[in-house]
Image (tube, helix red, strand yellow):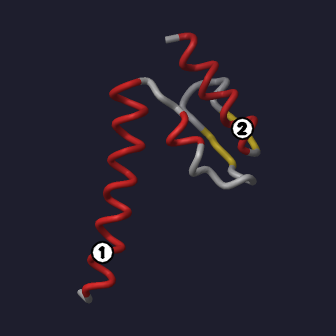
């Protein structure tokens, strides 16, 4: 693995850690939502966990968070 690939891999790992700690550790959705593509499709495990587009997916996540 090249030095550049190692650096990129560490950056991806750090970002994943930040998103997971925010979501699971602090109930902070924003790091996850900030990295979704505008045309994202989300199919979650709950009946209402479906969304097309960043705003729709964000609403689904916020709704699930409020129910918890």
The label nearer to you, 1 versus 2, is 1
Tally the numbered discs: 2
Quarter occupied by residue 44 = top right
Residue 59 appears left or right of 7: right
Query: Where residue 67 sits: x, y (%)?
Result: 56, 10
The residue labelled by disc 2 is: 51
Q: Residue at x 71, y 43 (%)?
A: 54
Residue at 75% from the left image edge and 43% from the top image edge: 52
Report which quarter residue 49 is drawn in: top right
Q: Check disc 1 and report the residue beneath it.
A: 7
Instruction: For mark 2, give the secondary structure.
Output: strand
Q: Position of residue 61 (x, y in %)?
A: 60, 28
Question: Which quarter shows the N terminus?
Answer: bottom left
Q: How many C-alpha atoms fall within 10 Å of the one at disc 1: few (<14), some, or many (≥20)?
A: few
* Quarter of the figure with residue 20: top left
Relative vertical location of residue 18 with respect to residue 3 in this rendering, above or below: above
Q: Is residue 1 above or below residue 55?
A: below
Horizontal placement of 52 versus 28: left or right? right
Residue drawn at x 66%, y 28% is 60
Q: On screen, 30 above or below 41?
A: above
Q: Residue furthest bottom?
A: 2
Percent position of residue 7, x then y: 30, 75
**Which residue is located at x 68 percent, y 34 percent?**
50
Dot 1: element: helix
Q: Nearer the viewer, residue 13 or 60?
A: 13
Gap in angstroms between the C-alphas marked 1 and 2: 33 Å
The mark nearer the N terminus, 1 or 2, is 1
Residue 7 versus residue 39: which sits nearer the camera? 7
For this orientation, the residue located farthest to the top is 67
């Amino acid at each position: 693995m090249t030095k550049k690939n190692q650096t990129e891999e560490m950056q991806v790992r750090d970002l994943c850690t930040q998103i997971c700690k925010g979501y699971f550790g602090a109930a902070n959705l924003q790091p996850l939502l900030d990295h979704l593509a505008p045309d994202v499709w989300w199919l979650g495990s709950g009946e209402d966990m479906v969304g097309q587009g960043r705003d729709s997916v964000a609403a689904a996540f916020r709704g699930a968070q409020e129910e918890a």
